[in-house]
Amino acid sequence: MTTSGVMARNPAGSGGAEVSGFARSRSVALVGLDGHVVDVEVDIGQSLPAFTIIGLPDQAVNESKERIRSAARHAGVPLAPRKITVNLSPATLPKRGSHFDAAVVMAVLSAQGVVRVPPDTVFYAELGLDGSLRPVRGVLPAVLAAVRAGITRVVVAEENRAEAELVAGASVSSAHHLAELLVEHGADPALLQRVAIPTVPRAPGTPAAGNGSGEEPIRDLRDVVGQVEGRQALEIAAAGGHHLLMVGPPGAGKTMLAERLPGILPDLGDEDSLEVTSVHSLRGDDGCSALVRRPPFQAPHHSITLPALCGGGSGMPRPGAISLAHRGVLFLDEAPEFDRRVLDALRQPLESGTVTIARAQSVAHYPARFQLVLAANPCACGNAGGTGQTCTCSAVQRRRYFGKLSGPLLDRVDLQLRVPAVTYRELSSTGDARPEDSATVAARVLAARAAQAERLAAVGCRLNSTVPGSLLHRRLSPGTRAVEPLRAAMERRTLTARGFVKVLRVAWTLADLAGSTVPTPEHVQLALYFKTTVTA
């Protein structure tokens, strides 16, 4: 950006010491997935040498002073031995991370008269001591925030270029070394001849250019033997975006069914794909060179902690497993083995589709619109429920084991079914009666979702699982005769008001799969069966 105030006295590129000036550059601060453009203001005074950063910087931002000094020296333009004051504005917004390095050094060198930084540029990269530009996390949401704020030009490290270019409307520039960046912004081109630009191998754990989706090979439903009801429930869950609980003995196929749910879900649309990829970019498990198009699948171990599931950590909170499963599937195998606090923490995100992480200075919001799939044994030993083996659990132990799945959590699960053990006849059956493959089921799911999108477009919904209850009681009511079993169930106190709404949502999904324009009494009865078969 054009410098203002007292301009530098030395010519551009000289790196002389007798300088004083003021300059600005820009970067982005992330709070959750929300990005805020930050003005990096630099003032160089005539006082004794000092380097001060203000504006609520964290430890990583404060440590940038030493990285910047060393990087500038290795780029052939050492910082002036004067008092350098850096203000990150707005000053009330916490600044976290090493990605401010590039913006700060460009503002400082602009104040020295070495370069001129245009106002429509955001810098988002870490500096190495040798002057190299290092890749950082969260490039995709940061570039999105810049473009939405009207700033179209973005400068990142070379390894982050592919990720930044995923944002439509962004003009992306990248560099390996600070010297290259300086020359691009008006410094003496002779810098590139005077500076030896090292080629440093990327350290382990640094974000790499690649697909950060964590996508697994698609598993086919054809591999699942038997389990007619389980396959039907899986198709209903996929078509309407419903949550699913499967209870059955070990080896019945619960995990196989759950792992095949992503394979019958449609690809993500552009908006959802951008949001999902942004979450993975912020997590920093891998770089993102392409948008995540397949619904993600997360299956954490039952030893997972609350911060790991919901998000958190010191400093800037990172998204947890439920946000990494956004627009996909969160599978909790052996669900009663999870800590009860962890399970109950799912209740609020299941309703709102977001998770909120509060800190003393900021609040981060992450998307968490996922499909929950729970799998559980009927008891701790797994032999209850007619497996042919003797259950060694007492009645108290069985209640305690399954009691970890609290009533409020189960009430939020639309589909609940018992998965019986597979018989030898089903396992050894061959011939023409092969199960349907995932592609066939996915086609029906796609058609059902298209019918939902057309019907619900006017109310701002896409899936039956998100239809407001008030709408189901009025315009989308299937009729008095169809809901009579639900009224009776509520009077018997076997169905809650939330359960009533969820049964109607599933009934509409059954109607969409059958090509009906309104749920029939049979659809409502089947939806009620899937809601109450486990808890009955």
Image (cartoon, rainbow, N blue to C red):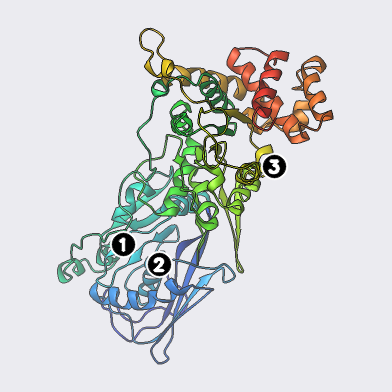
Numbered tag placed on residue 134 in the rendering: 1
Distance from disc 3 to disc 1, alpha carbons, whole Å, reads: 49 Å
Give the answer, above or below, for where 52 lies relative to 503: below
Q: Residue at x 57, y 24 (%)?
A: 236
The front one of 76 and 119 is: 76
The front one of 81 and 424 is: 424
Q: Residue at x 68, y 27 (%)?
A: 505
The front one of 19 and 140 is: 140
Mark 1: few/some/many CA within 10 Å (<14, 14-19, 20+): many
Image-based side of 335 in relation to 472, left or right: left
x then y, percent, for residue 398:
62, 42
Image-based side of 394 in relation to 45, left or right: right
Image-based side of 536 in relation to 240, left or right: right
Give the answer, above or below, for where 120 lies relative to 453: below
Amino acid carrying mark 1 in the image: Arg
The front one of 514 and 93 is: 514
Give the answer, above or below, for where 49 lies relative to 411: below
Q: Residue at x 45, y 62 (%)?
A: 27
Res. 462 in view: no
Give the mark nearer the N terminus: 3 vs 2.
Answer: 2
Which residue position is annotated with label 3? 407
Give the mark nearer the N terminus: 3 vs 1.
Answer: 1
Amino acid carrying mark 3 in the image: Gly
Quarter of the rendering occupied by the C terminus? top right
Whether tag 2 and tag 1 are in contact, CB under 8 A, the answer is: yes
Give the mark nearer the N terminus: 2 vs 1.
Answer: 2
Looking at the rendered image, the disc whose residue lies closer to the viewer, 3 or 1, is: 3
